[in-house]
Amino acid sequence: MGNQKHHHDGQYRRPYAKKSLGQNFLADPSYSQKIVSALGILGEDTVLEIGPGRGALTGLLAERAGRVVAVEIDRDLVSVLRDQFRDLPSVEIIEADFLDILPTEVLGDQVVPGSIKVAANLPYYISTAILRKLFDHRHLFSRIVVMLQKEVALRLAAQPGTSDRGFLTVLVEHGFDSEVLFDVPAGAFRPVPKVESAVVSLTPKSSQPAGFDELLVELASAGFRQKRKTLRNNLRSATGRTARLIESAGGAEALIGACGIEPNARAEDLSCDQWRALAREVS
Ligand code: SAM
């Protein structure tokens, strides 16, 4: 009865959690500690945080890192965070949609590739898009530690021949060495979410020749389009540039054969090396 828009909490009036922005705040500090420890921060490190929320990770990051750049979309939270960290010049709170910015815009053009650490308890409604963005800019990062919906974390680790394997699995396997570090129960968040979570570490692999990623991403995204279909049929129904690439390799059947892949294989059966072979074949 009579829900107020804000409630009083210590010195801050904290805005209520917005479901539409995936706001489930980490309320158990032992998990915040574990996430931050997993980043292995050294004193001079710069950490990019995506979605700092109420600062469950931000304060711990600030204690360890030389610089923390935290990107938060919610204006109400941004003003609370700016207030909270006003005496710490090493913490920058940026109000932005992470999907709309380039990491170098907020980190600065002088950022040393391979030097940035990323921490995020991701808003689950856009975790795939954020992982895709981190993949595209992975040359900047030395390590990424992200909290994901457990189901997504397991999908990232799914082996060839299992139905959990999908486009995101291939993307992450191609770009990173990944490890599922630990589970986080729903009860560790406020409000309590409907799903279980897990924390994953991603370490970028050395980058591929220019343009190779795009080919691999195009083929995998066409190959997984309809999961019940064979890879061959999915590639046959590709359109646009992907269709032309496949055509120039002699068509779907020839392309698959040239890579030593079973004619009736499904996308989920392929190893990352087989996706790379397909991309090389059309390059
Ligand atoms: N890091 C905090 C924690 O662990 O308690 C908050 C995690 S909460 C799951 C996700 C946060 O991401 C929320 O603060 C939400 O407002 C923010 N967020 C949602 N969409 C975003 C976007 N597109 N760009 C930046 N932040 C976003």
Image (tube, rainbow, N blue to C red):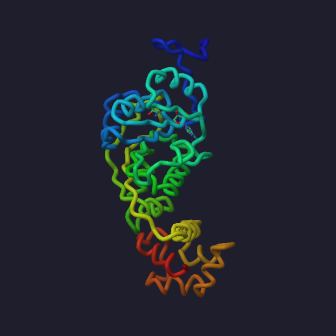
Q: Position of residue 248 (x, y in %)?
A: 62, 84
- The single residue placed furthest to the right in the displayed view is 240
Front-most of 280 and 20? 280
Q: 2 and 73: which one is in front?
A: 73
Task: Name the residue: 39% across, 45% down.
Answer: 145
Name the spot of residue 225 as percent of width and height, x first: 59, 66
Image quadrant where residue 162 sits = bottom left
Q: In which quarter of the image is the N terminus?
A: top right
Q: Residue at x 41, y 73 (%)?
A: 273
User: How many discs appear?
Assistant: 0
Q: Is 7 drawn above or below residue 27 in the view shown?
A: above
Residue at the (66%, 79%) spot, across then down: 244
Depth order, front residue of 189/57: 57
Q: How far across and how far down the image is residue 55, in percent?
A: 45, 28
Image x and y of residue 213, in percent: 51, 67
Q: In the rendered view, would you say 226 is above or below 181?
A: below
Tell me which corner region of the image, top left, top right, bottom left or bottom right, holds residue 156.
Answer: bottom left
251 up-or-down from 158: above or below: below
User: Looking at the rendering, which quadrant does residue 246 occupy?
Assistant: bottom right
Q: Which residue lies furthest to the front in this view?
A: 110
Q: Quadrant of the C terminus?
A: bottom right
Indicate whether 113 appears above or below 163.
Answer: above
